[in-house]
Image (cartoon, helix red, strand yellow):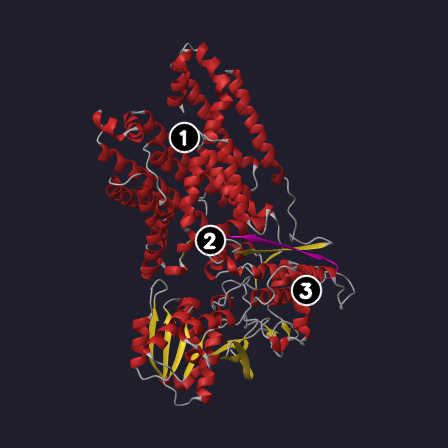
Amino acid sequence: MRKWFFVFGAMIVVASLTILPGAFARPSADPGVTAKTITLGGTFPLSGPVSSYAPIASGMKAYFSYVNARRSTVDRKRGVYGRQIVWKFVDDAYNPAQTVQITRQLVEQEKVFALVGGLGTEHQIAVREYLNQQKVPQIFVSTGASTFGRDYGQYPWTIGWQPDYVSEGSIYGKYIAANQPTAKIAILFQNDDYGKDYIEGLEKGLGSRQNLIVARQGFEVTAPSVASQIATLRASGAETLMIFATPPKTIQTYAIMARLGWKPDNIYLNSVSATDAFLSLAVQSAGAAAVNGSISTSYNKDPANAKWDNDAGMKLYRQIMAKYLPNARATDGLYLYGMAKAHSTVQALYLAGKTPTRAGLQRAVARLNYKDNPFLLPGIVTKTSGTDRFPISQLRLIRFNNGTWTEFGSLLAGR
Amino acid sequence: MGRLRALQLAGLGLVALVVALLPRFMTDFRAFQFAFVGIYFIALVGLNILTGYSGQISLGHGAFMGLGAYTTAILSTRYDIRDLWTIPLAGLVAGVVGFLFGFPALRLSGVYLALATFAIPVALISLAKRFEELTGGGGGLILSLPVAPFGLDTTPSRWLYYLTWGIGAVLFAAAWLLLRGRTGRAFRAVRDSEIAAAASGVNLAVFKTLAFGISAFYAGVAGSLLAIAVAFVNPDTFPISLSILLLTGVVVGGLGSLSGIVFGALFIQFVPLNASDISMQAPSVVYGVILLLVLFLLPGGAAGLLRRLLHPLTTRLYRRLNVGGGSVATTLRRGT
């Protein structure tokens, strides 16, 4: 009988020993900052259904490693004001329940200074309330949902980064209003916040010319086909088609239009689908004639496009890739996206000052104003203010022709 | 026998005491993590009733959790019902659906049943996205962050810990009582041989559907608690992989035994999370390797290991208690 108690006693001791050390962790005013380091965290889908986004976190890591190794032009020190950036990115398998747990782990256990670049609209919404309650900066989230820039009054510790879907939509609207005043616009959109953000932007951009829209058809994310929607849009007599969808449905749309023999004069598709890879698939299923001439927008340089070969920013990108990610496919634009985001992060850290605090970083991301991000298109200014929490809102129109996207026109402001 | 029962109760009491006192030695975050262990614990107890005791495989338990979670989320966000009161309702909703699913399952067994149950999570994801007005679609539902009710002076994480383990203890005791009596015997008879069970007068249809219903009830309660703890529900929260994870949890804990369940729950909570610490590139490979090792080294799961470790101890004990050496194995099996 006594032995039973020994066994349980031993179990209790072992359990306490494994759990106790954390109990004595000393709380400090602003966690994550020491004299030598500054610790940042982020959650990404490294496994699961959308693990193809994982290069973003690696790209950020590569750029932070580069910053930690180079000597700054500001003070000749490595890192940011002599502090090495420690980058803790963790897998949430694209599951919000995991995002919540891991975010708490990063904040409470790993004591990160701030969360940077967390990926996924729903996932970042799931942790937003908690992070704002804890007053932990949730900066440069990897999603274009407009709520992250719009709702700063309610969530002052949260900010997005890339042009939001409303901005992008408004650029299409402005361009059409100026260049195709007699257009008849048909819209195919994913029937949720994502698609509706785009329509809101388009209407805003069209301004007084909203009557140009002659038809709109929504589809459910789960719908297997958009054929009936496309038939309806075609019957409206529109000659300009807006596709506000995710890549698979966009590719499908091209295929269905080719089958129906419908070729609108102008096709606009949102930037999410506008990569060489996706459009090549569309060409395969619908033919080059159906896809050539499609218009979209972009804000970063395309590492797959040879026109940037002599560009200093692209050279830096390739140099960092060669050194820190030698085996990665450097033409994948997501690595560049991660580096561009890491570049903004480093800028914000400098702006937060030599003794960074969470409140200081929060103020810094609300007064960004710099234009030399080497990975973005020339001239793009990353800018925020007390009333503007959309860091990047400028875009350039791009047109697809025979396998590549080419910028045209000048830089346009989405907001 | 009386002393033996007393001893078992003392052991259980001691475990309960450990569980109750543990948060005192934990950081807030650890308490939060162990609240999730409690949630998985409840789901695994339920799944073990189905798979371990009545011998029916389910690859759909993640979806029953999802049903419970959506019940709680919809009731608390759309109808302003306090999350605490939605927990039994969530269990009931999942339980009824599980019970109904038991009927088609009657005609299936083995791999066929596993595949049929696999359809539940697949359907749930599309249904949740389809009825957007109710479920919030892909964007999901945001619940308010958990806080301790009735002005209790404790942090939200600790409150969640006590809530899940409190409910877990009650449901564990209920399962224990259920399985050691007539119902449990009927379940095991069905598992071991349906023909023999039917010949001895066990109504197969009743007990097989009952197992599904009870098991889904447990999953529903677990899902409800998950929704409360995460404070967010969308279809991505209940991926198909969750159902598979739960089944691995039961196998790791030990099929047909309640004593190892807590280890299965610990496995589900910590191994996938920490796999990415070992290898950033391929967390799922690390997870797979660990799972294989567990299955090879502990074929009976954690419960089997416990039994082996305690065997010399208990043999002497039983002999002293005069239970009789020959029946030790059977007594043990009945006891655990």
Q: Name the residue under label 2.
A: A95
Nearer the camera: disc 3 or disc 2:
3
Would you identify the image quadrant in which residue A245 lies? Answer: bottom left
* Comes first in the chain, label 3 or label 2: 2
Amino acid of disc 3: Ile
Give the side of residue A107 with respect to residue A253, left or right: right
Amino acid of disc 1: Leu
Q: Is the residue under label 1 in contact with that under label 3 (CB below 8 Å)?
A: no
Q: Magenta stretch: give its range.
A: A81-97
Q: Residue at x 67, y 76 (%)?
A: A311
Amino acid of disc 2: Asn
Q: Mark 3 points at which residue?
A: A320
Q: Are both tags, 2 and 1, on one chain? A: no
- Between the residue at mark 3 and the residue at mark 1, the CA separation in whole angstroms equals 54 Å
Q: Residues within 10 Å of mark 3 (few under 14, many from 20)?
A: some
Q: Residues within 10 Å of mark 1 (few under 14, many from 20)?
A: many
With respect to residue B132, does A181 lie above or below? Answer: below
Give the letter of the chain under mark 2.
A
Image coordinates of residue A382 in percent, x first then y, are: 60, 73
With respect to residue A206, does A122 lie above or below? Answer: above
Q: Which residue is drawn at 39% across and 55% down?
A: B235
Q: Name the residue under label 1.
A: B258
Q: Are both tags, 3 and 1, on one chain? A: no
Give the letter of the chain under mark 1.
B
Nearer the camera: disc 3 or disc 1:
3
Residue B71 in sight in this render: yes
* Magenta-colored stretch includes residue A48: no
